[in-house]
Amino acid sequence: MIVQVFYNKFTPELAKAVMKVRKTPFVQEVLFCKGERNMMVADNYVVWREGDGDPLDGLYDAKIIERVRASTYPFSG
């Protein structure tokens, strides 16, 4: 999983969130981009915004959504 970190100002809260994400085993790469607000995006899902809770909750939610999407079989009507 590749995580994009959009930051306007690199705050201590953002630094703690990035360290938590880097320690997660299924995160392969963390990319930093300048943006309007501090937030993280993983696999096209916003997993964390500054002021929200734990970024790992959003990461696991995105991982579950991707696994369910991969496990469902395509069928035609």
Image (spheres, rainbow, N blue to C red):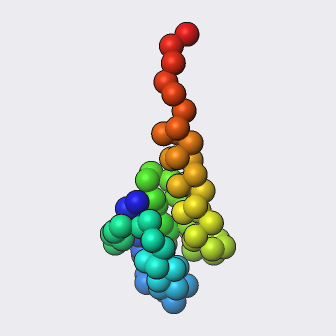
Q: Residue at x 51, y 28 (%)?
A: 73
Q: Position of residue 76 (x, y in %)?
A: 51, 13
Q: Quadrant of the N terminus?
A: bottom left
- State the count of labels: 0
Q: Residue at x 44, y 65 (%)?
A: 26
Instruction: Give left or right: position of 35 versus 45.
Output: left
Q: Quadrant of the C terminus?
A: top right
* Residue furthest bottom in the image: 12
* Residue furthest top in the image: 77
Q: Residue at x 52, y 85 (%)?
A: 16
Q: Residue at x 66, y 73 (%)?
A: 53
Q: Is residue 72 visible?
A: yes
* Residue furthest right in the image: 53
Q: Position of residue 8 (x, y in %)?
A: 42, 75
Q: Quadrant of residue 61?
A: bottom right
Q: Quadrant of residue 32?
A: bottom left
Q: Taking 50 as reference, is 43 above or below it?
A: above
Q: Is residue 4 visible?
A: no
Q: Taking 76 as reference, is 48 above or below it?
A: below
Q: Taking 51 as reference, is 48 above or below it?
A: above
- The foreground one among 38 and 70 is 70
Q: Position of residue 6 (x, y in %)?
A: 41, 69
- The foreground one among 69 and 50 is 69
